[in-house]
């Protein structure tokens, strides 16, 4: 059964209370949010299996801190979509604004369009697949997880990167401090293959290049001060 | 033959031995000095203020018989569940990682026995502190190390850290020596590497964004938790006003004497304003917005005695937070470890290399053997005792000024010993009815 919540008549607070209760109930129900009109903090803090489809664009922090739920935005998403996501799947049919997937710990963020700057900033285990391009400073201080970009990457990709793995099919305008191109080994191709399949992306793992940390900045060394 | 009298060797004030030692250290290492704690330089402080006490025009309360309330409620603006504290002294945010697990447990035990709150720090929430803290404030920091929605919901309040007094505008660095498997696991980073804490949040920029971020935090926690915003003592009037605009229930204002786990000494000593200079502008901002007492103000940075507490409250704060003093109460810089401080090139009272993880007192370390030196139960009792003394001292002063609640202390109860303190606190210079900048003079 699908329940529809129309935001022309249902306030944000009521929408989130309903969704959060349904997620906690572990009933794996299906919800449709009509007329979101760019509302902020929609479907955030979901903590259980639930399917939510948002019929239109969302504002800041849609699906923030998501756990287990599957949230689809049939439109574009504002800044910080799926920020600090723990698990589950968040799909954006359109474009995503800046900070998409910021600090995410787990789950899959699947962006069918482009993502703006700072995509995957400080990510801590989340997997992000962007079917289009990503903006500057993406994966800044990214710690864990995988960022897959089918298009191009902007300036300073992976600046001050830790252990996150970055895969880009197109061009990279520039790499950030301590980010280098790395060998694509079989285990990376396998990871990439799985993520592309999960995201429904039409691309082959062999078309990508892998980027990661040179690990030169892991412990402070005055001889590396010029890197900044 | 008489010896010709000699002028005594004269040390330079500008190039003192301490200054020269730092020049030599810098020349040898090529790295700036990193240390813990807050500003050590002499700055105008609460010591430069005095209470007037009651006399002909004020009626004092009997010191041992008449009630003087110390309770504080934080988070009355929007939160469904404000925090009720028995005393106006809270424990400031200090991270697990910077501090040992037993130290965090001791802070929780002491604060709980005293009826107040303690606060997490960078690195997330540990079971030690959640389990032993009846009221726990969860810091929401730029690094988001260990940040997860479950802990957010387990917290009693959320403190969005924009800055801190030791380093307004700066991030942090937990050096690899302290990154054990447990610390690294909580932060999703490899063991043994330096862990940088970013200087700004990853997913918002400015107060307009922060307002939306706070909306998200409230939506995730059912609008139950008070939301604090912590700011360093940079531009207290505007920062406080913008924090209110962004939706804060509580503003935490940290002056430059407020401590840090590890930052460049040059940052600690040369960036930010003294606590004393920050309070009145912050209170003025709240008053101009009609929010004084509706948005509570917590002041930190150099609080040591009940007199300091009383003075901060008299200037308009609702509560204070202590960090360094709490660590000293637990056992930090205790003279009984003098021989070991000497081996580390320091001495009792000056030991501040907390980032190295070799703390003889077992507080700012992750070394299992050193950690054993701190008994969290005994240390918690010491903290409780200290918090009790702060409260009793504050009450004593409030009663002497004729107040039956510590919140009734006011600037009119104070005078200043120096021109600087008079100007900063906007209370008259002792023996006058004037302070620099007073309207009409």
Image (spheres, rainbow, N blue to C red):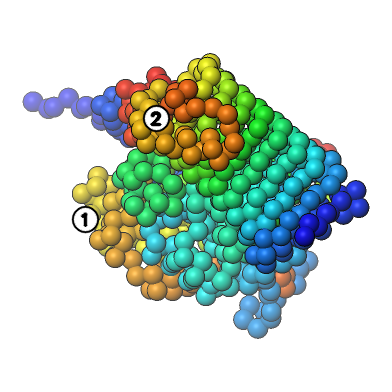
Closest to the observer, A186 or A221? A186
Residue B275 relative to residue B247: left or right: left
* Residue A77 image offset from top left, x and y in percent: 72, 37
> What residue is shown with label 1?
B339
> Is residue A212 among the parts visible in the rendering?
yes
Decide: is A164 above or below B92: above
Closer to the eye: label 2 or 1: 2
Q: What element carries label 2?
A: strand
Decide: marks 2, 1 in contact (CB < 8 A)? Answer: no
Give the chain letter at badge 2: A
Question: Looking at the image, which residue is at 69% across and 79% down?
Answer: B67
Question: Residue A213, which numbered label?
Answer: 2
Question: Looking at the image, which residue is at 67% across and 56% down?
Answer: A50
> Is residue B234 among the parts visible in the rendering?
no
Closest to the observer, B358 or B417? B358
Farthest bottom residue in view: B65
Residue B263 falls in image quadrant: top left
Distance, label 2 to label 1, CA atoms, is: 42 Å
Residue A62 relative to residue A212: left or right: right
Farthest right residue in view: A9
Question: Looking at the image, which residue is at 37% across and 36% down?
Answer: A187
Question: Residue A155, which numbered label?
Answer: none
Whether discs 2 and 1 lie on one chain: the answer is: no
Q: What element carries label 1?
A: helix
Question: Looking at the image, which residue is at 35% across and 30% down?
Answer: A185
Mark 1 Cα-neighbour bin, 10 Å: few <14, some 14–19, many ≥20: some
Closest to the observer, B271 or A136? A136
* Residue A98 image offset from top left, x and y in percent: 65, 32
* Residue B19 image offset from top left, x and y in percent: 35, 31
Give the chain letter at badge 1: B
């Amino acid at each position: 059964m699908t329940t529809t919540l129309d935001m022309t008549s249902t306030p944000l607070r009521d929408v989130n209370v309903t969704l959060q209760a349904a997620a906690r109930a572990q009933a794996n129900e299906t919800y449709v949010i009509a007329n979101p009109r760019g509302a902020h903090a929609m479907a955030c803090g979901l903590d259980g299996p639930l399917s939510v489809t948002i019929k239109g664009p969302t504002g800041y922090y849609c699906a923030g801190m998501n756990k287990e739920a599957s949230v689809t935005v049939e439109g574009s998403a504002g800044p910080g979509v799926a920020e600090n996501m723990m698990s589950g799947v968040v799909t954006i049919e359109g474009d995503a604004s800046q900070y998409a997937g910021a600090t995410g710990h787990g789950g899959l963020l699947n962006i069918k369009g482009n993502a703006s700057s700072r995509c995957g900033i400080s990510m801590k285990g989340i997997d992000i697949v962007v079917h289009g391009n990503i903006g500057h400073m993406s994966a800044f201080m990214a710690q864990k997880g995988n960022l897959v970009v089918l298009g191009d990457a902007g300036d300073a990709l992976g600046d001050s990167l830790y252990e996150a793995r970055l895969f880009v099919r197109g061009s990279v305008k520039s790499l950030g401090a301590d980010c280098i191109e790395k060998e694509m080994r079989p285990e990376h191709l396998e990871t990439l293959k799985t993520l592309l399949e999960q995201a429904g992306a039409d691309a082959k793992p062999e078309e990508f290049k892998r980027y990661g940390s040179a690990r030169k900045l892991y412990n402070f060394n005055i001889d590396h001060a010029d890197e900044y | 033959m008489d010896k010709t009298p000699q002028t005594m060797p004269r040390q330079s004030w500008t190039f003192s031995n301490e200054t020269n030692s730092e020049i030599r250290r810098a020349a040898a290492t090529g790295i700036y000095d990193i240390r813990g704690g807050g500003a050590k330089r002499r700055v105008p402080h609460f010591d430069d203020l005095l209470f007037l006490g009651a006399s002909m025009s004020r009626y004092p309360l009997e010191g041992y018989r008449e009630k003087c309330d110390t309770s504080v409620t934080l988070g009355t603006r929007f939160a469904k569940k404000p925090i009720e504290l028995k005393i106006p002294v809270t424990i400031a945010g200090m991270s697990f990682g910077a501090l040992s697990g037993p130290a965090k447990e001791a802070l929780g035990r002491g604060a709980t026995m005293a009826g107040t709150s303690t606060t997490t720090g960078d690195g997330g929430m540990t079971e030690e502190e959640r389990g032993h803290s009846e009221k726990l404030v969860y810091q929401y920091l730029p690094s988001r190390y260990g940040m997860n929605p479950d802990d957010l919901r387990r917290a009693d309040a959320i403190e969005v850290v924009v800055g801190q007094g030791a380093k307004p505008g700066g991030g942090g660095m937990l050096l690899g020596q302290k990154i054990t498997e447990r610390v690294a696991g909580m932060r999703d980073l490899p063991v043994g590497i330096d862990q940088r804490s970013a200087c700004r949040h990853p997913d918002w920029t400015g107060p307009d964004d922060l307002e939306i971020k706070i909306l998200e935090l409230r939506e995730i926690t059912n609008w139950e938790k008070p939301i604090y915003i912590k700011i360093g003592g940079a531009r207290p009037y505007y920062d406080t006003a913008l924090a209110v605009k962004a939706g804060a229930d509580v503003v935490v204002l940290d002056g430059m004497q407020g401590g840090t786990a590890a930052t460049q000494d040059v940052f600690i000593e040369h960036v930010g304003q003294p606590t004393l200079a920050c309070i009145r502008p912050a209170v003025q901002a709240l008053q101009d917005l009609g929010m004084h007492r509706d948005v509570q103000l917590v002041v930190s940075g150099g609080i040591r005695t009940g007199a300091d507490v009383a003075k901060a409250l008299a200037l308009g704060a609702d509560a204070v937070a202590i960090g360094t003093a709490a660590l000293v109460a637990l056992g930090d810089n205790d003279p009984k470890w003098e021989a070991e401080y000497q081996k580390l090139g320091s001495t009792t009272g000056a030991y501040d290399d907390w980032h190295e993880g070799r703390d003889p007192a077992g507080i700012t370390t992750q070394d299992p053997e050193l950690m054993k030196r701190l008994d969290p139960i005994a240390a918690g009792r010491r903290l409780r005792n200290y918090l009790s003394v702060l409260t009793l001292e504050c009450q004593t002063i409030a009663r002497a000024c004729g107040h039956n609640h510590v919140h009734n202390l006011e600037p009119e109860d104070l005078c200043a010993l120096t021109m600087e303190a008079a100007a900063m606190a906007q209370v008259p210079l002792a023996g006058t009815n004037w302070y620099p900048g007073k309207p009409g003079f």
